[in-house]
Amino acid sequence: MVAGNRFRYGQWRGGPDPLAPPYDVRAAVDAVGADVLAGGSLRESLRELLRRGPQGRGGLDDLAARARRLRREALRRGDLDGAVTRARALLDQALAAERDELRGRDGDDARFAEAVLDNLPRSTARAVEELSGYEWASAEARQTYQRILDGLRGEVLEQRFAGLRDAARAAADPATQRQLAEMMRDLNDLLARHARAEDTTDAFAEFMRRHGEFFPERPRDVDELVDVLARRAAAGERLMRSLSDRQREELAGLMRQSLGDRLAGELSRLDGHLRSLRPDLNWQRGERVRGDQPLGYGEATGALDEIAELDELLDSLDQDQPGATLDDVDVEAVARTLGREAADDVRRLRELERELRRQGWVTRDAEGLTLSPKALRRLAGTALRRVFADLTAGPRGQHDLRSAGAAGEVSGASRPWEYGDEQPLDVVRTLTRAVRRAGTGVPVQLAVEDFEVVETERRASAAVVLCVDLSYSMISQGRWGPMKQTALALSHLMATRFPQDALQIVGFGREAMPLTQQELAAVEPDMQQGTNLQHALRLAGRHLRRHPGAEPVVLVVTDGEPTAHLDPEDGEAYFHWPPLPETITATIREVDKLTRYGATLNLFMLGDDPGLRRFVDAVARRSKGRMFTPDLDDLGEYVVSDYLRARHGHR
């Protein structure tokens, strides 16, 4: 609204906000996080985001489905042998007209000509070749025969050089044939220099000046020219590969006859250059194209070229190659094959991927996209909120130790600075003391006695090890998601509320390994058999010994009794089912080491396996720890509550 020179601004009311982005980046990250917390693969969840598309529409899967449908339609377009079929029909028409003419003539010449026609080979290509020197009696027959040669020659040249106007007529003109041969000779010379890595900038410009009319695509350099020509040549080669041996021989013979020695030689030389310059194109693959409609040479190669382009598009949409990005998808090819709306969908997905990277939600490594530390913090925060939503008790285990400590939490009080203090300065109170002492004025003069430091409350620190079972049974029994959610929630709790505590997550299958938060989110189940708790407890002991002044806390989440241990001789993991006495003994040895160090093992048993129950119960009694059998939905609550209790010695 305008009132004089004054403007009033309000909420947009004219429909959808024109400035709003076509996607919600945070919602996309949360959708990936929800899949991960439910037990899904991190990388697969990110791929699914792009496959489904923002708000479940316009994703890669939709585009790939449309491309596959078009490919199926192209495979049913018609009969690839149409060029030979048409040539056979024209040849029969020419021979019928010639015989009609000869029957009306007397003399030996007419009878001899009839004998020649009667003894023509059954092969269309060989018959056309033998008739190349035949003196036609019928003008109609001669014209029909010439249509075989001119028509195929025109189709081949038009397929290779899109700028050739009225190809059949132009190719029949001797002057045009000389011009074509000269152009192909110059083109072969240019490509030969390019293959030798010579500078062809000036040569390319001169070639386009002289022969640019044959290339309406207006390539900007030799590489673009090679790309245009190589794709068409590859389509012609794929046509040959798609025919039967007899059909291939027939078409090749007709093409040699129609092009003549000079054009055929230059075209063969051109194909050799293009094949060596673009070996990445699929020159060897044939297709089983079927249909009732006979396709001419240009139509057949056009169908095969379309199929090849759709295959390339499907490969890029699949995004299966290591390091693949949506920038690999040719938007122009999408527009040509699937339409403008599909190209717009690809642009939106590209923008989503770029925006996720720009805002720091995802990073890219050698294997593809993965969540960034920023996104993992958001994911872990979500996991922690879910856990705390189930906690009905108040805060536990604060166990305050009153003293001034740099690693503590702010109490709200301050005190005068003393030599050796490392606490942060209380700037407001320091300046207030200086003003009271020296009065107002700028600059404020500070003295040693003016400084005050923030007083903090030191919290008792803990060294925590969370050992999580990564065996295949965890995912097959639906325990993978709750396990990940629990570990991420605990790591986020410690990072935000107890940063002085030291957490180490240890995953164990046939072998054990330390995991960062990012590795935990992306980790996949161990497909090898084996539950090596001994190795996990050994790594736990190493972590505790690196933090000798902290409260030692070891939490174990598992759904199977130990079935693997490290061989004392070579250090290799050894698996056996049912568990061997050696495996149980090696595991108990690590339990005793942790117990002597002062750590208590609290074990969270998932499932109701009797052997596991006996083992876990025995370990809990031996280490003076506790055994829990939570439901999957309560696992996070149990682990977080136990950590809050155990970190301060409330065992």
Image: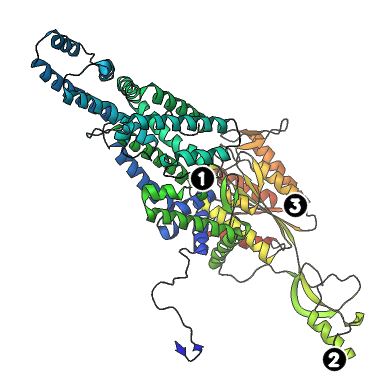
* Of the two numbered discs 3 and 2 in the rendering, the one whose residue sits closer to the viewer: 2
Q: Nearer the viewer, residue 518 or 364?
A: 364
Q: Nearer the viewer, residue 618 or 550?
A: 550
Q: Secondary structure at mark 2?
A: loop
Say which residue label 2 marks. Answer: 440
The quadrant where residue 442 appears: bottom right
Left or right: 18 with respect to 465?
left
Q: Amino acid at mark 3?
A: Leu
Say which residue label 3 marks. Answer: 544
Alpha-carbon span between mark 2 and mark 1: 73 Å
Rendered location of residue 502, percent (x, y) = 72, 57
Rendered location of residue 496, percent (x, y) = 66, 65
Q: Earlier in the sequence, mark 3 or mark 2?
A: 2
Rendered location of residue 611, percent (x, y) = 55, 42
Q: Is residue 607 visible?
A: no
Residue drawn at (22%, 34%), measured in percent from left and top? Answer: 292
